[in-house]
Image (cartoon, grey):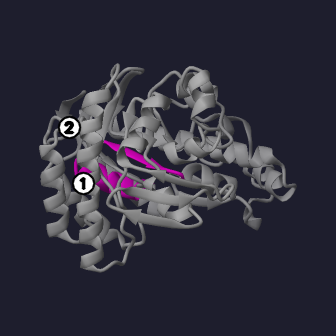
Amino acid sequence: MYTRIHKDKNSRARLGKLLTAHGEIETPVFMPVGTHGTVKGITPKELDECGAQIMLSNAYHLFLRPGLDIIRKAGGLHKFISWQKPILTDSGGYQIFSLALLRKITDKGVEFQSHIDGKKHFLTPEDVLDIQLTLGSDIMMPLDECAHYPCSRDHAQIAMKRTIAWAKQARQSFKQKKTGRQALFGIIQGATYEDLRKECAQVIIDMDFDGLAIGGVSVGEPSDLIYNTIANVAEMLPEDKARYVMGIGYPPDILEAVERSVDMFDCVAPTRLGRNGTAFTSRGKLIIRNACFQEDSGPLDATCSCYTCKNFTRAYLRHLFYAEETLGMILLSLHNIYFYLDMMRNVRKAIAEDRFTEYKKDFLERYNKG
């Protein structure tokens, strides 16, 4: 499924290709998040034009609304949302633990009340896999338990061992039910405890999943702990498997993880911050509501070629937010998605030319200077 194409001569950054039923993905790659089957404020056509290769959706949310029967009758998630490129579905474990009204976690699975209507549900690892098989996603994630930061070692160990047990159940069920070219990734947990991470990684590696994910990072811990966790786990992972850090991030975090040989990323930040009036630019984050942009006739980012930057001024975008026009949120979200995807295009080019370290240094100098 994954093939490493090239390794940067001056870092651990790597260039690869990920083959799925709905197309080939060049890595490192950023996956825009379409939790409910839509990247907020962005049409599938616009997402495609920005260069998105794959999008992420959430099995928990789609299971609750609109429900599997509707998506099954539509012919699967790709047809339902009119997106013919690859889709990765997160299991929804994190959402169950963070959003459900009431939840009870046992070794058998998770009992919870829907945050939408309060209805009770119980999902086993096999159930979560079946949901994603019905959705027809190209890459599926098993049910796991994410320990929040900070947490005790005992809690982290319990969550890690439960994640391993659930992974075994999901893997066995997947072998029996696998159809087509759907892939299942394994998730490595263990919080910030290096020995637990390494123990979990070795067991998950031995299960021979199609790809490997580092979960439970960026849940409140400081950056140095995130980077150390990524580095310690990544150095154990086999070269022929795609490496995915779940929920990372912001541009500096992505570059740090790429340098540590990670291939796949997702984060809601581009659209969430865009809806709140914040743009990612080559000079750092820009808050469009600020008074200094009231008469600014320049684009959000002079180095950007997105639709927003080629057609609208900062003054106009600021006006849209103060007038409470939804177009402002759409245009900033569109720019932010393009900015992330363009950054990843430049990352891949830099790795191919053995100059990733130089690219990262130049990017961060401009980005952090503001």
Residue mark closest to the camera, 1 vs 2: 1
Residue at (29, 51) in percent of width and height = 166
Specify whether residue 266 is painted magenta: yes
Along the line of sight, the residue nearer the viewer: 110 or 98: 110
Classify 153 as above or below 29: below
Task: Note whether 80 is above or below 359 in the view shown.
Answer: above
For badge 2, the amino acid type reads: Lys
Given residues 35 and 70, the one toward you in this image is 70
Q: Position of residue 128 (x, y in %)?
A: 42, 43
Closer to the chain start, of discs 1 and 2, is 1
* Lateral position of residue 191 relative to residue 136, left or right: left
Residues drawn in magenta = 251-268
Res. 21 visible in picture: yes
- Mark count: 2
Secondary structure at badge 1 equals helix
**26 to the left or right of 52:** left
Q: Position of residue 296 (x, y in %)?
A: 75, 54
**Residue linked to disc 1:** 165
Q: Give the structural element (helix, strand or loop) at label 2.
A: loop
Q: Disc 2 designates what residue?
A: 241
Q: CA distance from mark 1 to mark 2?
A: 21 Å
